[in-house]
Image (cartoon, rainbow, N blue to C red):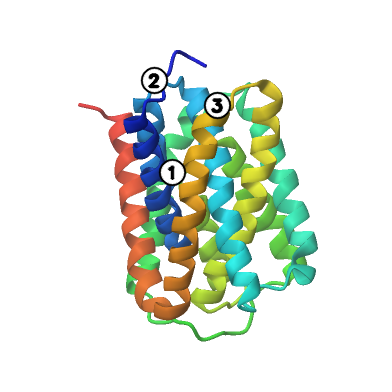
Amino acid sequence: MSGVELSLDILALLFFTGVLAGMVDAIAGGGGLIALPVLLSTGLAPTQALATNKLQGSFGTFSSTLYFIRNDLIRLGELKFMIACTFVGAATGTLIVQRISTQFLAGIIPLLLIGIALYFLLSPTISDDHRSPRISPLLFSLSVGFGVGFYDGFFGPGAGSFFAIGFVGLLGFGLTKATAHTKVLNLTSNLASLIFFVISGHVIWSIGLTMGIGQMIGARFGARLVLRRGVRLIRPMIVLICILISSKLLLQIHPG
């Protein structure tokens, strides 16, 4: 297991990291910003950290998705094709990433995320009100569902923000409803990637399950906050997460 010693202190750190990551992820996405550095600090190889992050993240997205379904923000029957396209996209991205370098994306994605942050920060139309969709759910599934799913399997950072802006800007969803639906597609892409990571043997189960329990608790709390606070909470959190992810990626490109 890569020589990682799971002392009581490390288990407690992993659990509480999962709680915090799950809460942040349920509200705005970007829980991997919190989880991945901690996973790497335990001594895991990068591929093991990415694979284990998919496992623990799946617990959180499942918890928040279930909460939103029970509160009638999501109707899975209406999302079957969208879920299928996202799954195929994520599976395809996960297979390809094992053969192609992701370095070229590292220079493009920060600019896109900064653009999303500015959109959510400055646009007066961002609210919990619903508007007329600009494209059909079918076209959304084929473009955003497959495309962002592919991106999540291939690279990952900021996928939740890309899903959210798609729901808001293209399907006219209010921000709370968009956040709820984003969790469904995040769960789908996480599971698709996780399947292939499990097959390749990169998942460290003891760590992933410990964090996963924390993720379920944190995600449930975060989902409750989304319903209570709505756009007042989600909007600034998405802006913050986009800026943090962009900064992290830019620092990786230009460490000096």
Looking at the image, is mark 1 or mark 2 nearer the viewer? 2
Q: Residue at x 38, y 81 (%)?
A: 124
Classify 223 as above or below 47: below
The residue lying at 40 percent from left, 38 percent from top is: 14
User: What residue is drawn where x is 32% and y is 68%?
Assistant: 236
Residue 144 or residue 222, whichever sits in front: 222
Mark-to-mark CA distance, 1 and 3: 16 Å
The amino acid at mark 3 is: Ile
Q: Which residue lies under the disc numbered 2? A: 43
Describe the element under mark 2 as helix, strand or loop: loop
User: Mark 1 to mark 2: distance in Å?
Assistant: 17 Å
Between disc 1 and disc 3, whose residue precedes? 1
Q: Mark 1 points at which residue?
A: 32
The Cα–Cα distance between marks 3 and 2, rounded to whole angstroms, is: 11 Å
N-terminal of the pair, mark 1 or mark 2, is 1
Instruction: Identify residue type, mark 2.
Output: Gly
Instruction: Give the residue furthest to the front.
Output: 8
Total marks in image: 3
Is label 1 in a helix, a strand or a loop? helix
Residue 246, above or below 48 = below
Q: To which residue does mark 3 refer? A: 204
Residue 96 image offset from top left, x and y in percent = 66, 29
Left or right: where does residue 64 sit relative to residue 243?
right
In the image, residue 93 sits, relative to residue 18, either above or below, namely: above
Q: Do the residues labelled 1 and 3 touch (CB within 8 Å)?
A: no
Residue 33, visible in the rendered structure: no
Q: Disc 1 marks which amino acid?
A: Gly
Question: Mark 3: which secondary structure?
Answer: loop
Quarter-of-image position of residue 120: bottom left
